Amino acid sequence: MVKPADYAGGQTAWCPGCGNFGILVALKRALVELDIKPKQVLMVSGIGQAGKLPHYTRGNVLNVLHGRTLPAATAAKMVNPELIVIAIGGDGDGYGEGGNHFLHSLRRNHNITYLVHNNQVYGLTKGQASPTSDPGFVTKTTPQGAYNPIHPLTIAIAADGSFVARGFAGDTEHLANLIKQGIRHRGFALLDILQPCVTFNHKNTHAWYRERVYKLDESSYDASSKTAAFEKAQEWGDRIPIGVIYRKERATFEDQLPALTKGALVRQNLDPAKVERLLGEFL
Amino acid sequence: MPVDINFMIGGEAGQGVQSIGSILAKALARGGFRIFADQDYESRVRGGHNFFRVRASDTEINAISESIDILIALNKESIDLHLSEVNGSGAIIYDDDKIKDAGKHESLFAVPLERLARDSAKNKLMSNTVALGAALGLANYDKNIITGVIEQHFGSGEAGKANIAAADAGYEYARANFKRAFTHNLVPTGDSRRMLLSGNDAIALGALAAGCKFMAAYPMTPTTTIMEYMASKAKDLNVVVVQPEDEIAAINMIIGASFAGVRSLTATSGGGFCLMVEGIGLAGMTETPIVVVLGQRAGPAIGLPTRTEQGDLEFAIHAAHGEFPRAVLAPATVEDAFWLTVKAFNLAEQYQTPVILITDQHLASSYATVEKFDLSRVTIDRGASLTKEELTALGEYKRHRITESGISPRAIPLEGGALVVTDSDEHDEEGHLIEDAETRTAMMMKRLSKMEGLRREIAPPRVYGTPEAEVTLMGWGSTCGAIKEAVSLATADGLKVNMVHFNEIWPFPSEAASDALRGARKIIAVENNATAQLAHLLRAETGYQAAGKILKFDGRPFSPAYILNGLKREVR
């Protein structure tokens, strides 16, 4: 049995009270409860405070460039589908710099879990607007207020995402449960996680989120309806839904790769006779 | 008399220029001739002017010729543009029913291509096969070989039979109606079992032979056919080939795939390579082996999308911020393309760093005959790694352990059981991010020390011609064949000339280059670019300076004659 101590990691460099702690706790808890060993896990993280998370727990770690978590993570999954691949990044990383990869990873439906620490602000560069900053949010780069945010959940549904969910870093039990569902889901599981930034976002605070979030699994909401999901994904303001907003079973990208029907690519050896035959085709 | 005959097929995109060009090349290769065939095409799907040149010889050739013996002109433009290149005894095959205003020139040879196609094959679309037959008829070539190659191309069914009939009609028409004496009588000779393939084919085969298991690439001329070939064999050879959203995804995918344990490849051209640059640095920092094919075309920006240039050498050597080891290999020939691809994969894994295979449109899409690659000579060296047992005995695994060679034995996630940790931030031996000066310095030195080993792997430049040369022509990459032939032509003209040619460029083989150039009295840089980038590199690395330059940056490849003319200007 896997124990919480198996996931004990290094010293953190986050601000006291940072929402990232809740996400770290929830992730470790989900992995322990699913009885997944650290060596089975590959965490691929981007740049930003979220990208440091893998160093504060244990597992295989590939920390990449800003915005590039998904290409690296999805490829590792194609090479070794037995790895539990978890991509980790922030809102700037995933929805700004990596926006194109976000769209296409959703459409391809790679069997990985993607945790987006969405604090609606840039933390590592000290307080600039992010793609998800609320309209009017004043920062040093947007003195007149941020303009118009993107809505990652509606984008994910439109891009045929097969598991679209929102969590809250302030409710680790609920979040751990969502992460478990995401890992168990066969396909691309997006978890947009509301993550209070105690240093640079004085609008969307712990208290601000706590007053507004409500759990979809405590209502009669049906996550299988795309139309309902679009409506629900746009709900933002006085009430903010958390939980699974949309889910759908469909084939993964890996399912249609003929090479993988013979097992993990990493364990397949080259057959020189086949190359010899190819040479013959040029005679 | 030695055989050296040059065919050109000219026409619009969509007229089958490439198709009959490749059948012609194959038919001549089958007769034992050495082939060098190149393509010149515009960036469009229909229309425009395209040509396919097939040069056949009974000795080894690796360059184009601009003197045409037989021109198959599928449209009027092909006659207008290439008439001056057709030599005195040459012939221009054209359809006088279609091209009424061809003018008067003694090399024009009218063949009713469309009428013969209708009569023989009941299909006017086969008029280009008629033209192919007529061209080979002029050269009195072996009909059985032509039939065999057409059958291989079109199958033995209706399409094959109709094309054979069309080729035969053209062949017989040419034999009966060509009134002048045609000087080339092509008698099949010697070894007829050589491979005929393009530079891109050779790279794809090299990658598969080296055990490449993963390719991610975004289509871009001139390297797209590498990906297409790999994709066509993906199922049979258990390879994953992905076409992602952009080149940034492509390079980051191969980094992820390589980290997870398989040999990984991407291929692009200059514009795509620009987008990949950050990934080159990530591979350097995380010590992840990757192979990147950079097939150059004329830049900057979109430039001349379908044309050749050698403008990216210094870019490839310096791409990405920061300092880290890399290798840059520049295949000179189609054969080289195969072997250097294999070497690229080995170097990437032995030194855990990016390797760039720099080619160009000319090499990528030119076809040459080569002896069948001897796969028993292919070695796969995956570099230092730790087995499951070794990892268990070791206890704690450090992905970036500091060693004398700078090479830290690799472990593969999940496969060995050890946790593999790496970071694009500066990191410690375990792979965790750090900021302290001491660790930073140690890790920089560790990574850069791999340059020493890598430098020893780089082959010396190739030297060809007399050691007593008064002029040394220096080049790199795809210009090798043209320079070599220019040296032969110049030598026959009484000039004392030799060649020093680089196909493995970085880390720069400074000592070997100095040795090769020590006796050189006058170095002339021959490069398909405007600023003589190799000459610049040579001066920086050795102090040797090129005294003259023969440069070409019009998007077209060098011919030996062009280099010879340049040489005569330089030594005058």
Image (spheres, grey):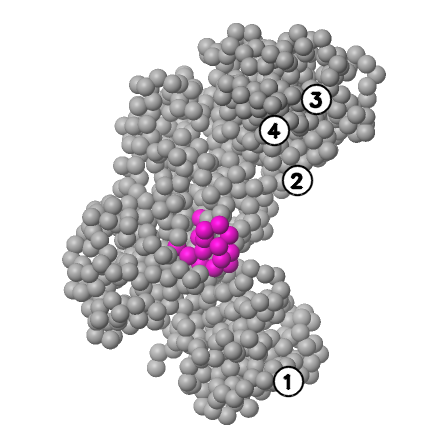
Please tell me how crowded label 3 is: few (under 14), some (14-19), or many (20+) other residues with Cα within 10 Å.
many
- Callout in the foreground (3, 4): 4
Q: Secondary structure at mark 1?
A: loop
- Disc 2 designates what residue? A256
Residue B516 shows in the view: no
- Disc 4 designates what residue? A95
Rounded to the nearest whole Å, what is the CA distance between mark 2 and mark 3?
25 Å
Q: Which mark is residue A165?
A: 3
Q: Secondary structure at mark 4?
A: helix
- Callout in the foreground (2, 1): 1
Where B224 sits versus A220, above or below? below
Expressed as whole percent of the image width and height from the top left, the position of residue B348 reads 39, 39
Q: Secondary structure at mark 2?
A: helix
Where B360 sits versus A184, above or below? below
| Residues rendered magenta in the picture | B294-310
The chain ID associated with circle 2 is A
Badge 1 amino acid: Asp
Q: Which image quadrant for residue B191?
A: bottom left
The answer to if B298 sits in the magenta stretch is: yes
The answer to if B278 sits in the magenta stretch is: no
Q: Which mark is residue B97?
A: 1
